[in-house]
Amino acid sequence: MRTPHRSPLALAIALAVAASACTGGAEEPAASDARLKVAFFQDLSIEDPLDLVSPSFLALEAGLAQAADGGTRGVPIIVQFDTGGDPVAALESAQTVAADDAYVAVVAAPFWTMPEDVAAVFADAGLPVLSLSDASRPAAPGLVWRRFVAPAPAQADELAARAGAATRGTICVVSDDTIRAEALAPAVGERLGDRAVARTAADVDGCGAVVWTGGPSGAAALRVSLPDERPLLVADAAKTAAYLDEAIPASDGTVAVCPCVDVTIATDLPARRFVNVYQAATGLAPGVFAAEGWDIASLLAGIAEGSPEAGRAAYLAGVDAVTGVLGPGGPIAFDAQGEPLGASREAHASEAAGRRWLPLG
């Protein structure tokens, strides 16, 4: 697989994230640091985790740091755990977290599917889970759960709707060999009905539009091979700077769909404040799932502000009592199971223009 070009700053961030999240382990604070902790569970074995996972972590870290710098006492620190896509490693890390009373919450990173036995460990330990992943909610009785992004079906809905509007002809649905892409492709096809045909990337002749459900390198190769006028729609796994860099100028006009919001060009005050803080902390524009990472930071900082000496039980109760948040991407309301309601359940589209993704209405 080709390694995309990275700026020195982006590469430094990538190396820092990777170094602190070795499979089955985590970056632990010094022994003298008695601060509370939040576990950030991620899978860095996916293609291009720098673009897809790091933005949410960096936003979460920046939001908590801002709260601590502003005088909020008891703000937890973030500790990363990389499962490497291995359910055994995920379970071992979950047991480590559950056994350490300093951990007060768990964040499920984008593109990570939480196994049910891992969720059961968190439920039994009284650890609330704040999810940035659109994967199915694990069946774990007693689990306190809040999802900050649209669930997986929303992405299939939006991809199918936009593909259907892009052409009157046949729509080719193509995936790579990742589990997530292979699950999303038939969901899109089902919504398109007899207008959709499942194809490989090498067999898209005659299609009025193409939907790609895999990662950025496959999307870039597909875009370059297509005629310029052929619409290409991609899922969140390809909404990366790597795709733009590899496919430019053919990438212009590509439509990406994500269960996250994009506030990079928003003009309202909460969005601008978030973008400014994120850029000051990282030197980068917020990427996918960054706004939702900031939402989680705000929730955790709010609990800390209300109970600076609180432990796990207080965070569990605090998360369980939350019915909604208001962040840079707008309000998110939760139902009784912790799933987003209303507009919060909708996926969002962006269009490639130059080396930027610009939100579409």
Image (cartoon, rainbow, N blue to C red):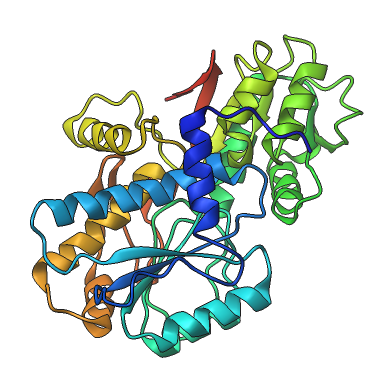
91 and 252: which one is in front?
A: 91
Residue found at x 52% / y 44%: 14
Q: Residue 69: x percent and y percent?
A: 14, 52
Q: Residue 232: x percent and y percent?
A: 69, 24
The quarter in which the C terminus is drawn is: top left
Q: Is residue 274 above or below residue 123?
A: above
The answer to whether residue 116 shows anywhere in this view is no
264 and 145: which one is in front?
A: 264
Q: Is residue 101 left or right of residue 360?
A: left
Q: Is residue 352 left or right of residue 199?
A: left
Splitting the image into 4 quarters, where does residue 162 fall?
top right
Residue found at x 62% / y 44%: 156
Splitting the image into 4 quarters, where does residue 248 fall?
top right
Splitting the image into 4 quarters, where does residue 159 fall?
top right
Q: Total number of numbered labels?
A: 0
Residue found at x 42% / y 88%: 99
Q: Is residue 278 above or below residue 118?
A: above
Q: Is residue 191 left or right of residue 352?
A: right
